[in-house]
Image (tube, rainbow, N blue to C red):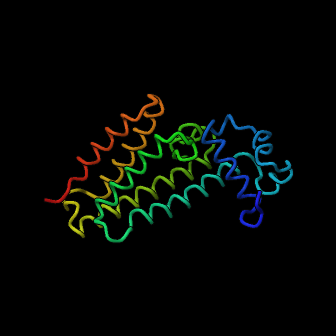
């Protein structure tokens, strides 16, 4: 571990994210996490009161990074808002079909698994999904303003429908182990976000 660039807690979270991306939260044992992270047990409990607290920190870190990525993609200068939105969903498609589990959405991976076992983690996921939906809504509103999305497309409802569509398509992609559901989601996204005439 390079302590010059990363704190011990960040290192544990990074290793944990990779392991959870591959096998899920419940299946991850602390012994395995500490062995792969190469840190003593005391270090873990110095930063995290429990595995659940670790999970909460992991989700908070992930969502903070995701929010920054959304800002960069959806506020990119020089592109109409609709093109930025379609670029975001194209990137989603690429990430969810990637061979690298670390590229997969942590919300998709954990939502069903942890929502029934940890109210704190469920609450963080709820706030995070609302944050993402709000980003999408503002991008649609920007499309109204720049003329790339018709004003007849309701921003709040369409943003919520799109996010739910892509979450569902990502789950179906995991079940089917092929990307057709995401391609179908892209088709529906083009329908829900028509170009202005």
Give the camera-side residue of 113 and 76. 76
Could you tell me which quadrant the C terminus lies in?
bottom left
Q: Is residue 192 left or right of residue 113?
A: left
Give how far across and how far down residue 20 sits, in percent: 64, 42
User: Which corner quadrant holds the N terminus?
Assistant: bottom right
Taking the spot 66% from the left edge, 42% from the top edge, the residue there is 19
Residue 48: percent from left, percent from top: 76, 53
Q: Residue at x 31, y 38 (%)?
A: 184
Residue 93: horizontal and vertical position, in percent? 41, 45
- Does residue 155 appear to the left or right of 130 in the view shown? left
The x and y percentages for residue 176 are: 44, 28
User: Disc count in the image?
Assistant: 0
- Which residue reaches farthest left? 197
- Residue 127 relative to residue 39: left or right: left
Q: Which residue is at the front of the view, 168 or 122?
A: 168
Q: Quadrant of residue 62?
A: bottom right
Q: Measuring 47% from the left and 42% from the top, which residue is drawn there?
A: 96
Going by the picture, which residue comes out furthest to the top?
176
């Amino acid at each position: 571990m390079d302590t010059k660039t990363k704190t011990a807690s960040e290192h544990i979270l990074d290793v944990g994210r990779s392991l959870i991306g591959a096998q899920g939260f419940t299946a991850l044992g602390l012994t395995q996490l500490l062995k792969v992270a190469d840190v003593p047990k005391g270090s873990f409990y110095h930063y995290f009161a429990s595995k659940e607290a670790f999970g909460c920190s992991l989700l908070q870190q992930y969502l903070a990074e995701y929010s920054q990525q959304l800002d960069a993609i959806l506020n990119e200068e020089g592109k109409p808002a609709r093109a930025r939105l379609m670029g975001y969903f194209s990137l989603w498609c690429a990430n969810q079909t990637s061979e690298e589990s670390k590229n997969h959405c942590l919300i998709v991976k954990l939502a069903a698994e942890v929502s029934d076992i940890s109210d704190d983690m469920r609450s963080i996921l709820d706030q995070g999904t609302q944050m993402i939906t709000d980003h999408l809504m503002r991008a649609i509103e920007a499309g109204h303003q720049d003329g790339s999305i018709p004003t007849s497309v309701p921003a709040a409802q369409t943003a919520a429908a799109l996010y739910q569509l892509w979450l569902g398509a990502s789950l179906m992609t995991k079940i089917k182990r092929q990307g057709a559901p995401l391609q179908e989601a892209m088709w529906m996204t083009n329908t829900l976000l028509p170009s202005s005439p």
